[in-house]
Image: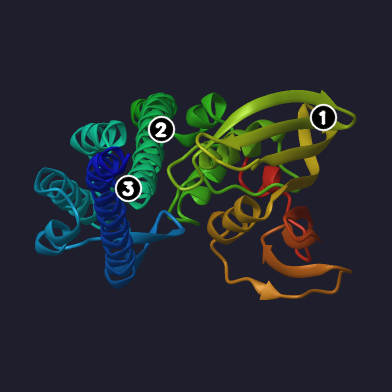
């Protein structure tokens, strides 16, 4: 019986010792893992830095390779360090407003994501996503810029062709009048061909843009084309989009060739039939503030006077038979009204218009 008991003890004791050793080894391994995990946390806290990517504040993580080697497998540490260098390259491109390339970064993140790398790669993923968003915005802006540039070139080309044709016709008419005057040695024949010859010459020297005109008391067919040419010229860059007859006159609508806002000018002429002439009795130009004020400042060459005797009048001009007043309808809508001025002029008599 004693022999059996002794043999049993000899058999059991080695297993007890082995089990005890295993428990001790496991405890040591867990302690080491906790220590490494703590080191990783401290490394992340130590090397985190803030950066702003397209308006968002991000935590940027850059850990030196020797520090990574202390807590990670050398292959994983090398791959993470290479990933950080690639991210640094794209970060520099972002701050220099250049295109970024994310293929290598995406590949490294994919490989690190499918292996047990033992490192928090979420900081790199968020940074990569921020650069991806930046690149998409950049590509969208490039496409938009190309579309706008093409539209601008097309519109400018058409406008220049139209303006060139108008100027060509006007030059031909002027040259034709000059040739007739020279051939006949008399202005009478020229006046038969162009009854507004004297008035047209007088208006050309009033303003640098050479499309200047008076409005009140002159025929619609003289004033309207000259204002229209100015609105379509290089200074205003507008395009006529509508023309219609309204009560007691006509109305035109102009819009910018290229605009990101709803800008416009509506020009309404009030006319009265007097003999064979459709004389303008009033002209109203209503539109968005920028266009209306730009027209008011540049079309009339005289020095404006602030205020006026009319209610709501911001400024006014007086030239020949016109009074040109500027009114504010709302913060973004202004109106120009052209009526009879203090001077009464009979253009038909003074400029020999038949």
Image position of 308 with respect to 31: above or below: below
Q: Residue at x 62, y 41 (%)?
A: 352
Which residue lies under the disc numbered 3? 121
Which mark identifies residue 275?
1
Q: Which callout, 3 or 1, points to the residue nearer the camera?
A: 3
Residue 33 locus on image (x, y percent): 29, 57
Locate the N terminus and report the quarter of the image it occupies: top left
* Tag 3 secondary structure: loop
Judge whether 294 appears above or below 116 on screen.
below
- The quadrant of the rendering that contains the C terminus is top right
For the residues labelled 1 and 2, say whether their Cβ atoms are less than 8 Å apart.
no
Quadrant of the image occupied by residue 40: bottom left
Nearer the observer, 292 or 135: 135
Disc 3/disc 1 C-alpha distance (Å): 88 Å
In terms of depth relative to the viewer, which is nearer, 104 or 316?
A: 104
Q: Which badge, 2 or 3, comes first in the chain's sequence?
A: 3
Could you say where residue 9 lies in the image, as x and y percent from the top left? 28, 45
Q: Estimate how packed mark 2 is, as few (under 14), some (14 to 19) or many (20 or more) residues with alpha carbons within 10 Å.
A: some
Earlier-in-chain disc, 3 versus 1 = 3
Q: CA distance from mark 2 to mark 3?
A: 47 Å
Color style of the picture: rainbow
Residue at the spot of label 2: 152
């Amino acid at each position: 019986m004693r022999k059996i008991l002794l043999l049993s003890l000899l058999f059991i004791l080695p297993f007890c010792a082995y089990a005890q050793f295993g428990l001790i080894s496991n405890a040591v391994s867990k302690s080491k893992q906790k220590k490494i995990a703590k080191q990783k946390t401290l490394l992340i806290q130590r090397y985190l830095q803030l950066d702003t990517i397209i308006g968002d504040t991000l935590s940027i993580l850059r850990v030196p390779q020797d520090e990574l080697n202390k807590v990670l497998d050398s292959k994983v540490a090398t791959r993470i360090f290479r990933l950080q260098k690639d991210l640094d390259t794209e970060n520099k491109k972002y701050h220099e407003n250049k295109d970024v390339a994310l293929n290598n970064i995406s590949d490294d993140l994919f490989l690190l994501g499918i292996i047990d790398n033992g490192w928090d790669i979420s900081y790199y993923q968020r940074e990569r996503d921020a650069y991806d968003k930046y690149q998409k915005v950049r590509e969208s802006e490039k496409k938009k810029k190309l579309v706008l540039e093409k539209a601008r070139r097309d519109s400018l080309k058409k406008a220049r062709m139209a303006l060139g044709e108008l100027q060509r016709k006007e030059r031909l008419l002027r040259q034709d009048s000059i040739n007739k005057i020279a051939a006949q040695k008399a202005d009478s024949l020229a006046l038969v061909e162009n009854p507004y010859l004297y008035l047209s010459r007088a208006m050309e020297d009033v303003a640098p843009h050479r499309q200047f005109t008076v409005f009140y008391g002159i025929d619609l067919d003289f004033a309207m084309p000259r204002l229209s040419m100015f609105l379509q010229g290089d200074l205003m860059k507008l395009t006529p989009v509508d023309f219609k007859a309204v009560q007691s006159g006509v109305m035109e609508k102009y819009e910018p060739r290229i605009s990101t806002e709803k800008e416009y000018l509506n020009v309404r002429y009030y006319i009265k039939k007097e003999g064979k002439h459709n004389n303008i009795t009033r002209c109203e130009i209503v539109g968005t503030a920028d266009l209306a004020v730009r027209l008011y400042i540049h079309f009339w060459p005289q020095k404006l006077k602030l205020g006026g005797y009319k209610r709501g009048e911001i400024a006014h001009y007086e030239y020949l038979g016109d009074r040109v007043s500027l009114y504010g309808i709302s913060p973004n809508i202004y109106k120009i009204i052209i009526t009879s001025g203090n001077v009464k002029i009979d253009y038909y008599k003074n400029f020999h218009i038949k």
